[in-house]
Amino acid sequence: MLTGQYPHDFRPNQDLIAEILAGKIVPIRQRDSSIPAKLAVVIDRALSNDVKARYQDAGEMLKALEQVL
């Protein structure tokens, strides 16, 4: 929502579900370099392909956002 683009690069005739499940997330600052680096870390972590690396609940992400904002 911050960039107006999807976090994945979708190509024509591509299986969208396969890209979402197996594709790599484009770091948010590659989409918009004006996003503050500390905020980008929070967003990129929330979108990580590695479930264990993501925030485990909304409260944990809220704390991270509060520290950044």
Image: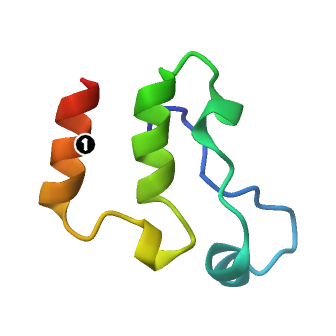
Q: Is residue 2 left or right of residue 13?
A: left
- The residue to which callout 1 is attached is 64
Where residue 62 appears, x then y in whole percent?
17, 46
Q: As displayed, is residue 50 above or below residue 10?
A: below
Callout count: 1
Looking at the rendering, in which quadrant would you find the C terminus?
top left
Q: Is residue 27 left or right of residue 39?
A: right
Q: As displayed, is residue 22 above or below residue 67?
A: below
Pick the front one: 26 or 61: 61
Task: Give, as a three-letter code, the residue at label 1.
Answer: Ala
Give the residue at the far top of this rendering: 34
- Residue 64, image quadrant: top left
Pick the front one: 3 or 48: 48
Where residue 61 appears, x then y in whole percent?
24, 52
Q: Residues within 10 Å of mark 1 (few under 14, many from 20)?
A: some
Q: Residue at x 62, y 31 (%)?
A: 29
Q: Residue at x 57, y 71 (%)?
A: 49
Looking at the rendering, in which quadrant would you find the N terminus?
top left
Q: Residue at x 70, y 80 (%)?
A: 22
- Residue 9, image quadrant: bottom right
Where residue 42 appears, x then y in whole percent?
40, 43
Q: Residue at x 64, y 44 (%)?
A: 27
